[in-house]
Image (tube, rainbow, N blue to C red):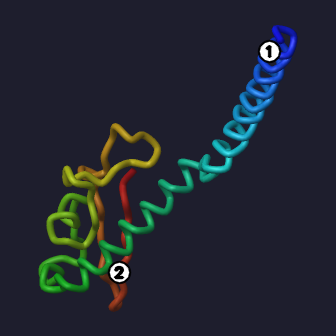
């Protein structure tokens, strides 16, 4: 009777070991499936493109500011304040290259020539 009980314990330990090893292998492979392969510089370039698009829309809505000069200088914070750019819950536009930095103080220069807007983002 003791012999049969020892076999059951050994079988249970082996089954537990196989399941544990399988669990770690599966979790390791699945965790890499959710990792991001997007480069931080690519995300930053997309953010700059978004800022340029929002700046163009801002300039179109504020054409009267080009009466004195064909150049308008704003900050990203102006785009956030006027609801042309979405920010996080703290009102910050995060820098994709470093999550501790924000782009709110970034200067945007908009030039209006021949009914076209040229936007330059100082980075």
Q: Is residue 108 left or right of residue 26?
A: left
Looking at the image, tell me whether mark 2 or mark 1 is earlier in sequence order: 1
Q: Is residue 43 left or right of residue 92?
A: right
Q: Residue visible at 20% across and 54% down?
A: 91
Left or right of residue 33, residue 82 in this image: left
- Residue 55 coordinates in the image, percent (x, y): 30, 72
Rendered image: mark on residue 74 = none
Dot label at residue 117: 2
Q: Nearer the viewer, residue 68 or 107?
A: 107
- Image coordinates of residue 118 in percent, x first then y, are 38, 75
Tell me: 23 left or right of 91. Answer: right
Q: Residue at x 17, y 82 (%)?
A: 62
Foreground: 41 or 67? 41
SS under mark 1: helix
Nearer mark to the viewer, of 2 and 1: 1
Q: Residues within 10 Å of mark 1 (few under 14, many from 20)?
A: few
Please tell me how many numbered marks the rendered image carries. 2
The picture places residue 45, in percent across and down from the top left corner, at 50, 58
Which image quarter: residue 65? Answer: bottom left
State the image coordinates of residue 106 (x, y, percent, origin top left).
29, 52
What is the CA distance from the residue labelled 2 to the residue labelled 1? 83 Å
Picture quarter with the N terminus: top right
Q: Is residue 28 above or below residue 1?
A: below
At numbered mark 2, what does the secondary structure look like: helix, strand or loop? strand
As drawn, 94 above or below 21: below
Q: Which mark is residue 5?
A: 1
- The residue sitting at 33% across, 91% down in the picture is 115
Of residues 68 and 87, the one nearer the viewer is 87
């Amino acid at each position: 009777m003791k012999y049969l009980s020892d076999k059951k314990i050994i079988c249970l330990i082996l089954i537990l070991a196989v399941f544990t090893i399988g669990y770690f292998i599966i979790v390791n492979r699945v965790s890499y499936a959710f990792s991001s392969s997007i480069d931080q510089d690519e995300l930053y370039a997309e953010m700059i493109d978004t800022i340029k698009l929002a700046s163009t829309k801002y300039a179109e809505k504020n054409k009267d500011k080009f009466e004195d000069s064909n150049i308008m200088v704003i900050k990203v914070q102006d785009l956030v304040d006027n609801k042309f750019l979405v920010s996080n819950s703290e009102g910050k536009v995060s820098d994709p290259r470093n999550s501790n930095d924000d782009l709110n103080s970034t200067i945007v220069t908009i030039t209006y020539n021949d009914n076209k807007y040229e936007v330059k983002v100082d980075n």
